[in-house]
Image (cartoon, grey):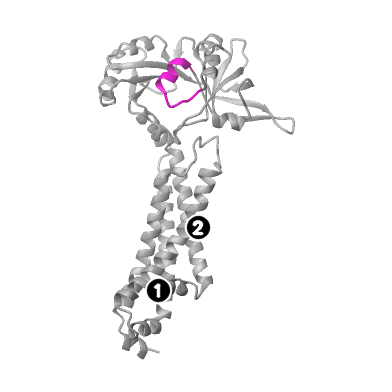
Amino acid sequence: MRLLFFNLLRKPLRTGLTVFGVGVALLLFCFLETVLVAFNVGVTMSDASRLVVQHKESIVFQLPMSYRSRIEQVEGVTGVAGASWFGALSQEPASNGATREEFFAQFATDIERYLAIYPELTIPVEQRRNLLGDQMGCLLGAKIAERLGKKVGDRLVLRSTIWTQKNGSPIWEFNVRAIYTTDSPTFDQTIMLFPWKRFDEARQFGGGSAGLYLAKVADANRSAAIAARIDALFENSPHETRTMTEKAFNLQFVGMMGSFQLLLRSIGSAIVLTMLLVSANTMMMSARERTREMGILKAIGFSDGHVFLLLIGEALTISLFGALAGIGPAWLVANVLHFNPKPDFFPVFYLPNESMLAAAGLAALTGFASGIVPAVAGMRLKATEALRSV
């Protein structure tokens, strides 16, 4: 072991630059993985026991509110909540006197029914009671509340880009009555919910309709059959439906990104290949420079296996130090400091354990692949040939 570290420190600049190169490559790999997780967060948080009912033609078309009671009567459905996308921007005063606008997801819904379908949301009992008792109230996720600088009891002003009030104004005001948290790292904490009744009574158009329905089923294994029954209810009606699992619904939006995920994967593959070439070049140079030393080691009693382990160990050590240099900062920035480069686009931005393990595995694989050729060559080297070449 001492000999291994001694060899690494013989040329500290080269070793340090190699570790740095591997670390930068793995840091970029982790960042790309974090972005991919952010894009797929809606799919990750999906529950197989939840169905989404939307208009057959497009999600932009509304469905009658009367559908809710009919969906509830389908065997296997345990709960239904209607929801409509609000599409608004917050109106907060900026330091320069202008208005600062923030985009985040807002839904008008029957909050009590919604919370029954999404038990992941944790709300203090008193806040929940105040929320359900105030038609002007709203529920904010902890992250969007922090981003907006809001706490329970504050006033929230939104400018809707879709819905105007009956007086023609796009400005809607709410009381922040509750803030939800969740133990799930993939659940979106940037959502706002407010009472459906207030929304339906105040909006200028579209009364008595919902954008979609969320249905909870008792048995997730029967989701496909239940979805087919729901759609059969409204066949040949003016508002036919398309029912799918929550995961399939969210995959629609991921699919809109086209081949963007493939592009990110391709970039990640190029990074890994570059990392391998850098590490392999370092190990080949190191092995060539120490041909005489390997001959001396064998002459004084070191076996072929000892030389093999020494060279492969150097390559693995460099790669694993590079893994620490790359994965450590990525974990610190994403999971400890909670840095999010685009919070209005990525509601969840974190580095999962699986990605860190994959990065560590890539580092180990890179070290082994870059060290195997010089290690095998060193193992096969004859002491007399090595000493004769000097």
Residue closer to the observer: 251 or 49: 49
Q: Could you tell me if residue 30 is visible in this image?
A: yes
Residue 222 sits in quarter: top left
- Crowding at label 1, few (<14), some or many (≥20) Cα neighbours within 10 Å? some
The residue depicted at 46 percent of the width and 25 percent of the height is 121
Q: Position of residue 71 (x, y in %)?
A: 34, 13
Marks 2 and 1 sit apart, C-alpha to C-alpha, by 22 Å
Q: Could you tell me if residue 211 is visible in this image?
A: no
Q: Which residues are magenta?
A: 109-123
Tell me the quadrant of the picture where the C terminus can be found. bottom left
SS for dot 1: helix
Mark 2: amino acid: Ala
**For discs 2 and 1, the disc positioned in front in the rendered view:** 2
SS for dot 2: helix
Q: Is residue 289 above or below residue 139?
A: below
Tell me the quadrant of the picture where the N terminus can be found. bottom left
Given the current orientation, which residue lies at the most extreme right position? 97
Mark 1: amino acid: Met
Residue 325, numbered circle: 2
Residue closer to the observer: 219 or 96: 219
Q: Position of residue 300 (x, y in %)?
A: 35, 85
Does label 2 or label 1 sit earlier along the sequence? 1
Residue 284, numbered circle: 1
Residue 250 sits in quarter: top left
Q: Position of residue 366 (x, y in %)?
A: 38, 61
Residue closer to the observer: 261 or 95: 95
Q: Position of residue 47 (x, y in %)?
A: 36, 29
> Any magenta on residue 173?
no
The residue depicted at 48 percent of the width and 17 percent of the height is 111
Residue closer to the observer: 256 or 140: 140
- Crowding at label 2, few (<14), some or many (≥20) Cα neighbours within 10 Å? many
